[in-house]
Image (cartoon, rainbow, N blue to C red):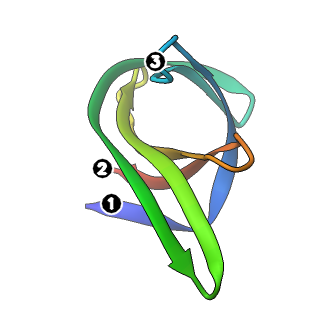
Amino acid sequence: MAKLLEKPEELKVSVNVQGVPLTLVRDGEKQRVTKVYQNWRVVEEWWGKEISRNYFRVKTNRGLVYDIYRDMPTGCWYLSRIHD
């Protein structure tokens, strides 16, 4: 089961040369990405506003699985879903 966050939570993320997440900082705690399960891109228009995001489903060294995304226009990273 997964928990979709009502409001995405902003993260600090470091990436490799290809843009794949290596670490993330959530609530002041740095977590290492140990596995990337999926990567997908969403480009669409929502209420007249263009949305362009790169999503990753990742597992961290704490054993947590997250869906995170990079908002392409701003470059900011967000947590959108936490998996059990």
Residue 63 at x, y = what percent?
35, 28
Q: Amino acid at mark 3?
A: Gln
Q: Earlier in the sequence, mark 1 or mark 2?
A: 1
- Helix, strand or loop under label 2: loop
Instruction: Using a 10 Å C-alpha cutoff, classify the residue at mark 1 as few (fewer than 14 neighbours), some (14 to 19) or many (20 or more).
Output: few
Location of residue 21 with respect to 72 vertically, above or below: above
Q: Is residue 37 above or below residue 66?
A: above
Name the amino acid, label 1.
Answer: Ala
Q: Quarter holding the N terminus?
A: bottom left
**58 left or right of 44 in image:** left
- Expressed as whole percent of the image width and height from the top left, the position of residue 39 reads 32, 39
Q: Identify which residue is drawn at 67% across, 25% down.
A: 29
Q: Which residue is mark 2?
A: 84
Image coords of residue 27 (percent x, y)? 71, 37
Labelled disc at residue 18: 3
Query: Element at badge 3?
Result: loop
Labelled pair 1, 2 in contact (Cβ < 8 Å)? yes
